[in-house]
Image (tube, helix red, strand yellow):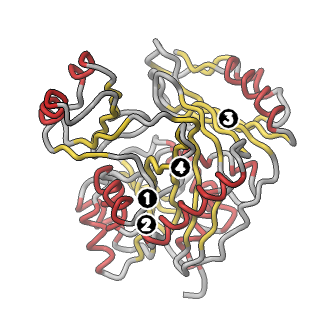
Amino acid sequence: MNSYLDQKIGVLGGGQLGKMLAQAASPMGIQLYILDKDKNFPAGQVAPHFTEGNFNDYDDVMAFGADKDIITIEIEAVNTDALVELEKMGKKVYPQPSIVSLIKDKGTQKLFYRNHHLPTSPFDLYDQWEDIITDVENGTLIYPFVQKARSGGYDGRGVQVVKGPEDLKVLLQVPSLVEDLVDIDREISVIVARSSNGEISSFPVVDMEFHPTANLVEFLYSPSKSPIDFQNQATRIAEKLVSELEIVGLLAVELFLDANGQILINEVAPRPHNSGHHTIEANVTSQYQQHLRAITGLPLGSTRSNLAAVMVNVLGEDGYTGRAHYQNIEDCLKMEGVYIHLYGKEMTKPFRKMGHITIVSDSLDRAIEKAKIVKNTLKVIT
């Protein structure tokens, strides 16, 4: 092959991350091939090569990957058995199937941190949810704690905070990870890229503010207001994790700074991530282009921030389910430095991610001020 332009790159998943990957690929001359159930999904609106199929189905993934040189993902919940077989056939599968399998189980994730001496909160694993109640009654598990489904959780789903006996009634009845409820001072994210050549590069640390009800990111702030030594330590932890995994592609590492000043890994995602959307407008290289550079073996791009930025997730309003209507969008488009990304989802429901908005400025305080206006102006209703 003469260059990366000759390689056929397949992506499992046609959601908003697949859409933004396709948008980043186009200027680079890369034609992505997308697999997902419906061409009406977000990526189908911009990717000319879209195959309708199920990325959880072994046969669909095998058929899709048969003529691809590189296969990547935009979601972890894919058929890893098929990816293992494609890898055996000589296909480049990034991130590697073994890493996808490890990460999509929150239990094996946490065991990896423990076994590699990476900081994380104390935890236990439970195959049966009833055993959680037994340990509470025996006094070996003490309130408050957090229960997380070992698989299948996303965007705040699959997480239950247990503060007292009344919360035992709503325990998730699935194999679970149970960890201490951390007294969080702040939540941050570091996105790290590792190329197929072993090159590693990190994006600047960002601060995250979560929605109190939906338990997903509501605001993201770049640059972080955390102390520089804390940012440097978080980046070192994230880069150590990437090196230990030997992952190829992006790894988004979400961390806590607890009330005692300790940095703890919360969880990770082996793909482009919500905490990196702002890089499209605010950084020299976007997370999407960086992922493509990493998996094709190209030199990684500069991660330097050009502008301060705030990212606001556009969520479906509580109480509205049906065909989406974007209220007051024109008022936001009048504002300088406001970049609206709508994902093209036809139907809205409470707290569904319908898009994001990045606000850039030469001052983070000015970006925050404008972001608050945008947040209170644009509403997704029916």
Q: Are marks 3 and 2 in contact (CB under 8 Å)?
A: no
Q: Residue at x 47, y 62 (%)?
A: 33
CB-based contact (under 8 Å), mark 1 and mark 4:
no
The answer to whether marks 2 and 4 mark residues whose Cβ atoms lie closer than 8 Å is no
What is the C-alpha distance between the residues marked 2 and 4? 26 Å
The mark that comes first in sequence, 2 or 4, is 2
Q: Residues within 10 Å of mark 1 (few under 14, many from 20)?
A: many
Label 1 – label 4 distance at C-alpha: 29 Å
Callout 1: helix, strand or loop?
strand
Give the quarter of the figure containing the N terminus.
Answer: bottom right
Tell me which amino acid carries mark 2: Pro
> In this rendering, which labeled residue sits more in front, label 2 or label 1?
2
For the residue labelled by badge 4, is the local secondary structure a helix, a strand or a loop?
Answer: strand
The residue that disc 2 covers is 95
Residue hosting label 3:
357
Q: Are marks 2 and 1 in contact (CB under 8 Å)?
A: yes
Between the residue at mark 1 and the residue at mark 3, the CA separation in whole angstroms equals: 24 Å
Image quarter of residue 4: bottom right
* Residue 263 - label: 4
Q: Which residue is mark 1?
A: 73
- Compared across the picture, whether 96 is left or right of 142 comes to right
- Amino acid on which the number 3 mark rests in the picture: Ile
Question: Alpha carbon of mark 4 to alpha carbon of mark 3: how far?
Answer: 29 Å
* C-alpha separation, residue under disc 3 versus residue under disc 2: 28 Å
- Quarter residue 370 falls in: top right
